[in-house]
Image: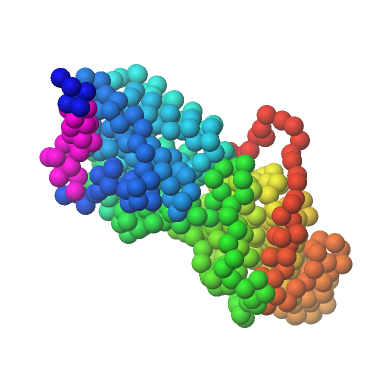
Amino acid sequence: MSNTQDLKKMLEKKMSILQGDAERIAKQRAQGKLTARERVAKLLDEGSFVETDALVSKKDDYAGVVTGYGTVQDRPVYIFAQDFTVHGGAMGVQHAQKICKILDLAQKTGAPVIALCDSAGVRLDEGAEAMNAYAQVYGKLAKLSGVCPIIAVVLGPAIGGAALIAQLADVSIMAEKVGSMMVYGPQVMSAVSGKTFNDETAGGAKVMAEQGGVALTAADEDAAIALAVQVLDLLPGSNAEDAPVVDADDLNRVLPEIDAADAAGLMAAMADEGAYVELYSQWGKEIRVALTRIGGYSVGLVVSDASVNEGMLAPAAAAKAARFIRFCDCYSLPVVSLINSKGVAVPDVKAQSWTMITTAQLLYAYAEATCTKVSVVVGNAIGQSYIAMAAKGSADMTYAWPGAVISALTPAAAAQVLCADELKAGKARADVEADYAANVADGINAAKAGLIDDVVDPAETRKYVIAAIEMLASKRESNPPKKHGNLPL
């Protein structure tokens, strides 16, 4: 047989493999799901995908994952897409080997990794070897964390060990209706609980968003993939480079009049062209976090939402903000904090330890972060909310709006504890509280004490923040030599 015939025969066999099983593909589409290769094609720039290890198999039993590299908006990325049409996308030895190769290449070259998750879990027929395969993937993801951004897009079931891939990513995105994530499948959950569950009620997008299991949700696969592109655009390729700087808005734009309790309004006003990607919007609502650009720089925005529980540091909110700050610090994104919080939420007695632990996580995250940190007290900064988010040990530059209250106690508590004599003398409580807020705990007195850098006109806030980010762009700071700190967990 000639070399030409050999080549033709080989290419025909390769095309047959790449096209996959027609019956299983039809079933996948009937469930409203794209195939692994269709997803890759939607995500990457047209014609840029280079597949790796496409023919890896054991007795023509293929690995169940598509791996390779390409570009997104002309920037290189590595990708793996689990193929549910092959053994339900379950993790086996060859499946893991293909993923590990991609993760190694990402670490060597400094490019983001995108995981398209669609897996029923582990290859049970491979027994302990399959479990070890999972362990290898987890180990690689853990070592890559903080080196290159990892984005997981959940486009099908992610059950058991498969769910942990999304948890080890920097940003996780789930498509509604098709995506689900759970520790055990709905059959097991139903049997154990005595209640009836399906994929959506056990671990669908709404459930996971409310529990903080995913950072973002989308209406369908196309929207989820578009979100992944949007997030990538705000991140650097690795920790060895800076995120792209884009001139898209007037650096001198002033803010409209905004209520300090209007967190969404504050975020839109600060962001270039009002555009931002909010993470974990349905979880820990006392604090809102988002990726955006301010003055062309990619930044992490941390905003107290005083309309929810007075912006207090409740456990979920503190844990959310702590993780987000550490994520930003991994890739040297400046953290801009807008603070309006009455301190730590008074917990149920049984939840005290969780409240203390998560508050400590927030304190730790701000203190440990060496990225640029700019804080603005737009309302209250009471107790630990000032200490964690705005104090000189936590921020490089701290500003306050007129009328801001910076104090160890709320005016109400201060009136009771510090102004008891005035109350006994008959002075109205409301007047005592107002006097304390205006003349003792206000921004001017905080500035006089060196607790903040300046009291600024709210309309000028964006200009001050941009100037601080530009001034601190060459900041060089490192933590003491150590293996790593012991984050309170």
Q: Which quadrant would the N terminus be assigned to in this image? A: top left
Q: Is residue 371 visible?
A: yes
User: What's the magenta region?
Assistant: 7-29
Q: Position of residue 376 (x, y in %)?
A: 70, 65
Colour mode? rainbow
Q: Nearer the viewer, residue 2 or 472?
A: 2
Query: 143 above or below 442?
Result: above
Secondary structure of the magenta portion, mostly? helix
| Corner quadrant of residue 451 | bottom right
Spot the residue most to the right: 448
Q: Position of residue 237 (x, y in %)?
A: 54, 45
- Whether residue 254 sits left or right of residue 144 in the image: it is right
Q: Which quadrant would the C terminus be assigned to in this image? A: top right
Q: Residue at x 36, y 43 (%)?
A: 49
Q: Nearer the viewer, residue 90 or 387?
A: 90
Query: 401 above or below 193?
Result: below
Q: Nearer the viewer, residue 18 or 297?
A: 18
Residue 58 belongs to magenta span: no
- Whether residue 140 sits left or right of residue 303 in the image: it is left
